[in-house]
């Protein structure tokens, strides 16, 4: 058993998992799992740079995480950075800040590496279950990109495409510094066109229609699931491995796309940092389900963090 810390820093959020990992048994025991919305990717699609205020929000979260890691005595830390830091011209500012705070250099991984970590984390509990058909298609809908991974015991094909809830919101819904509230039909059409083009690119590598089971990861998916379940507060144990039908995703997406900021913020399970981007994220999920023909999505709270933790344990 090895005690490790895994950090996943994406376009919208930064997340920490401190866990005891038994590689032989394939078990991960959570000690602390938390998330902060820092919007590191704020403006990156437009400027190509990480904004100073976005960096400071991220570093503030890193300071909190450093204290947790020290308190719990993790033997090894692995920090993985994804879409926003891949795209930014000034990513060295980000790297230096993380090293100063946590003592480790963030590993800016490729989309394919991100896909592999996500697949490992999401599917290790599903292998061997009679009610879950193979192959699995794991989709990780992030802030700046979405990863598609098809496999059974191992990855058969993977592709990362630059379509995510933050990127679509900033590209199509941001006008004069404010989010369109709610989106216009023309804006929704533009988002759908971008998503369709991204799915075309994904299908060049990943045969999406071959999926036996669609497994959905990350905040857009888990938030839609929490809404579908009618939860009064976010409960990851209830959300984990829940199933949401295509009809329910269509209903929720339609409601989110026609609601105001205040109406979305009033949803009990809505994290404040997702209020402005959840409609675009739900639309990405819906588009994937319609393209693949999936009648439902299995929602996983175990994802890239769990995959990173396993790799960290191998290195410790």
Image (tube, helix red, strand yellow):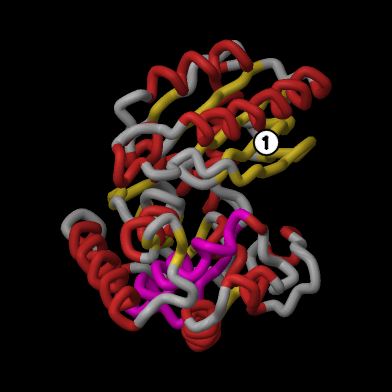
Q: Position of residue 226 (x, y in %)?
A: 67, 70
For label 1, the SS is: strand
Q: Is residue 155 above or below residue 186?
A: above
**Quadrant into which the N terminus falls:** top right
Q: Is residue 119 above or below residue 173?
A: above
- Nearest to the observer: residue 63 or residue 201: 63
What is the magenta segment's predominant secondary structure?
Answer: helix
Left or right, residue 281 beside residue 244: left
Left or right, residue 194 beside residue 148: left
Q: Quadrant of residue 233?
A: bottom right
**Quadrant into which the C terminus falls:** top right
Question: Which residue does the numbered mark 1 point to in the structure image?
Answer: 17
Left or right, residue 98 beside residue 231: left
Q: Is residue 293 magenta?
A: yes
Q: Write the residue at 35% across / 24% down.
A: 90
Left or right, residue 205 beside residue 152: left
The answer to whether residue 2 of the structure is visible from this angle is no
Q: Position of residue 67 (x, y in %)?
A: 77, 22
Q: Quadrant of residue 110?
A: top left
Residue segment shown in magenta: 273-300
Label 1: how many Cα within 10 Å (few below 14, some 14–19, many 20+): many
- Nearest to the observer: residue 54 or residue 86: 54
- Nearest to the observer: residue 300 or residue 262: 262
Quick one: which residue is furthest to the front in this view?
A: 176
Q: Position of residue 171 (x, y in %)?
A: 32, 58
Q: Position of residue 273 (x, y in %)?
A: 61, 54
């Amino acid at each position: 058993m090895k005690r490790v810390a895994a950090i996943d820093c994406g376009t919208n959020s930064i997340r920490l998992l401190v866990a005891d990992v038994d590689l032989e048994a394939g078990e991960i025991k959570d000690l602390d799992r938390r998330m902060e919305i820092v919007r590191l990717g704020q403006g990156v699609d437009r400027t190509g740079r990480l904004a100073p205020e976005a960096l400071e929000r991220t570093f503030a979260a890193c300071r909190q995480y450093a204290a947790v890691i020290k308190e719990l005595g993790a033997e090894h830390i692995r920090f993985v950075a994804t879409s926003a830091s891949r795209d930014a011209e000034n990513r060295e500012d980000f790297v230096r800040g993380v090293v100063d705070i946590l003592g480790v250099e963030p590993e800016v991984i490729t989309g394919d590496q991100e896909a592999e970590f996500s697949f490992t984390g999401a599917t290790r509990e599903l292998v061997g279950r009679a009610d879950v058909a193979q192959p699995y298609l794991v989709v990780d809908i992030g802030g700046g990109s979405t990863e598609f991974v098809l496999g059974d015991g191992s990855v058969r094909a993977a592709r990362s495409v630059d379509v995510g809830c933050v990127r679509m919101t900033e590209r199509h819904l941001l006008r004069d510094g404010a989010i369109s509230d709610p989106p216009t039909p023309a804006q929704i059409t533009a988002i759908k066109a971008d998503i369709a083009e991204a799915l075309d690119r994904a299908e060049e590598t990943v045969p999406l229609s071959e999926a036996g089971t669609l497994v959905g990861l990350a905040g857009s998916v888990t938030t839609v699931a929490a809404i579908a379940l009618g939860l009064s507060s976010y409960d990851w144990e209830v959300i984990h491995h829940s199933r949401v039908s295509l009809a329910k995703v269509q209903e929720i997406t339609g409601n989110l796309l026609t609601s105001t900021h205040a109406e979305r913020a009033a949803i009990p399970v809505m994290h404040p940092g997702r209020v402005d981007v959840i409609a675009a994220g739900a639309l990405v999920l819906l588009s994937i389900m319609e393209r693949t023909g999936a009648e439902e999505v299995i929602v996983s709270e175990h994802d890239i963090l769990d995959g990173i933790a396993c790799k960290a344990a191998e290195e410790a």
